[in-house]
Image (spheres, helix red, strand yellow):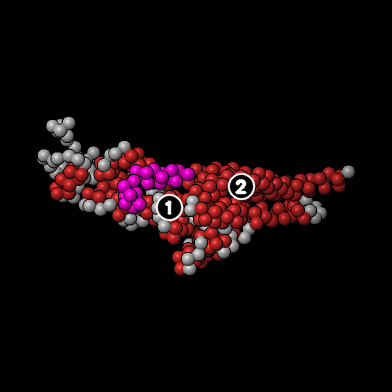
């Protein structure tokens, strides 16, 4: 009530800042006193910013789960008409990681100094991307911050669901590959050298298959450590090579030319593109700006290059989005036609939403087809290699038996 006295704590750099924060919460400060922080890291210790690693200023990163949780909780608090400063204070108190707690405090402090939420988030571009900041900015300008945060939370949840489906579908094939490969390596390095001793004193020439397996076994048993180090070094070199922008484009361009994977890759990327652009257009962001942000949300660098050219045509030549996308040469005709219909009818956002739904179904169907082909193919390859090793080991025994007869 009006006469009620509330006691609490706020984090601020000065007494003046503390008064401003209390006033922003709709309260009238009566007495403000500084609390000295304990040096032993007690309950009132201010979380300090780690000075190295991923927590260094300007390079801090959250996991997707942490950022999704932050977005959803902030959206729920703002939707419940909790003032933004109090919402951030609550998020800071219940943060599960030091990084999330530190950033919540910093954003809280910057808003207390008079900055907008989008401006405060913009100080951490490695955490909050352009899509995130633009939607918050639009929500602030239109007085619809809660719906903007809610849309962001729904968007990120949908992206996470698609990633989880792809990851879950790939778990079994990856496990099958490594299990089969490990089995062959163990056979060649541990078991076969002991068994092959029996064949060294055999009279007559061994079968060609047995000789091949014997040489492979000796090579792996002698140089397995060197081979492992070489594999790690080759992986490191490939990772460094791929970090170059030109090499990324080259590798992704090659992936787009594979007949088997091209359709699936395009389904994933077009679904992501249309879903992102739909969210931006629906929020009132111009198509050109939305096209730039949606392009950067993609993972395939070769497709990004094509879409940047399409944006230049829309921006500089006044071309329609549908015709510019068609000239990329890889954008599916269905998506181009749907966008054309949306442009002509003034319902581009609805068309983009329909495209995103359609390609979500395409991704699910594509995963089922890929898994139905990949699993038996891996079993056939690995089983064939192990079968060849066993056949090569048993063939001399069969020859001995035939010779005795």
Please state if 371 lies on the left or on the right of 395 as rendered.
left
- Residue nearest the viewer, comparing 143 with 258: 143
Q: Residues within 10 Å of mark 2 (few under 14, many from 20)?
A: some
Q: Secondary structure at mark 1?
A: helix
Range of magenta residues: 136-158
**187 magenta-colored:** no
Residue in view at x 21 percent, y 41 percent: 25
CA distance for labels 1 and 2: 27 Å
Residue underneath mark 2: 366
**Farthest front residue in view:** 345
Residue shown at the point (41%, 45%) measured from the top left: 151
Farthest bottom residue in view: 317
In x, y percent, where is residue 362?
59, 47
From the viewer's side, name the closer residue of 366 and 40.
366
Q: Circle 2 — which element?
A: helix
Q: Quadrant of residue 21?
A: top left
- At 59% from the left and 53% from the top, the residue drawn is 334
Dot label at residue 3:
none
Quadrant in the picture for the C terminus: top right
To which residue does mark 1 refer? 280
Q: Is residue 149 magenta?
A: yes
The percent coordinates of residue 70 (x first, y second) are 36, 43
* Neighbours of disc 1 within 10 Å: few (<14), some (14-19), many (20+): many
Residue 234: image quadrant is: bottom right
Q: Taking the image as drawn, is residue 240 in sight?
A: no
């Amino acid at each position: 009530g009006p006469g009620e006295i509330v006691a609490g704590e706020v984090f601020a750099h000065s007494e003046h800042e503390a008064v401003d924060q209390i006033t922003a919460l709709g309260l009238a400060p009566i007495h403000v006193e500084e609390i000295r922080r304990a040096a032993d890291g007690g309950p009132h210790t201010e979380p300090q910013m780690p000075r190295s690693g991923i927590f260094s200023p300007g390079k801090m990163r959250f996991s997707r789960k942490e950022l999704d949780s932050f977005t959803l909780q902030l959206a729920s608090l703002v939707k419940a008409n909790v003032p933004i400063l109090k919402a951030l204070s609550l998020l800071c108190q219940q943060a599960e990681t030091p990084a999330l707690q530190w950033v919540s405090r910093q954003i809280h402090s910057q808003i207390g100094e008079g900055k907008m939420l989008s401006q405060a988030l913009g100080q951490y571009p490695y955490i909050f991307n352009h899509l995130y900041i633009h939607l918050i900015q639009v929500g602030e300008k239109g007085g619809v911050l809660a719906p903007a945060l809610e849309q962001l939370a729904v968007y990120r949840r949908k992206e996470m669901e698609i990633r989880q489906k792809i990851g879950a579908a790939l778990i079994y094939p990856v496990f099958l590959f490594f299990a089969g490969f490990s089995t062959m390596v163990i056979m060649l390095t541990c078991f076969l050298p002991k068994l092959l001793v029996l064949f060294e004193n055999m009279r007559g020439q061994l079968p060609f298959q047995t000789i091949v397996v014997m040489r492979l076994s000796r090579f792996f048993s002698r140089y397995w450590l060197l081979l492992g180090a070489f594999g790690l070094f080759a992986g490191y070199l490939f990772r460094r090579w791929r970090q170059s922008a030109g090499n990324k484009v080259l590798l992704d361009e090659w992936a787009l030319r594979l007949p088997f994977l091209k359709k699936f890759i395009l389904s994933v990327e077009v679904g992501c593109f249309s879903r992102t652009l739909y969210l931006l257009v629906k929020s009132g962001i111009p198509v050109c700006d939305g096209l730039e942000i949606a392009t950067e949300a993609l993972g395939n660098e070769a497709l990004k290059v094509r879409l940047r050219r399409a944006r230049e045509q829309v921006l500089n030549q006044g071309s329609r989005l549908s015709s510019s996308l068609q000239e990329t040469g890889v954008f599916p005709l269905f998506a181009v036609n749907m966008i054309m219909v949306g442009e002509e009818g003034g319902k581009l956002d609805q068309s983009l939403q329909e495209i995103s739904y359609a390609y979500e179904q395409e991704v699910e169907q594509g995963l089922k087809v890929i898994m139905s082909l990949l699993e038996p193919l891996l079993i056939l390859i690995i089983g064939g290699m192990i079968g060849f090793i066993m056949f090569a080991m048993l063939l001399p025994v069969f020859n001995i038996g035939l010779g005795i007869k």
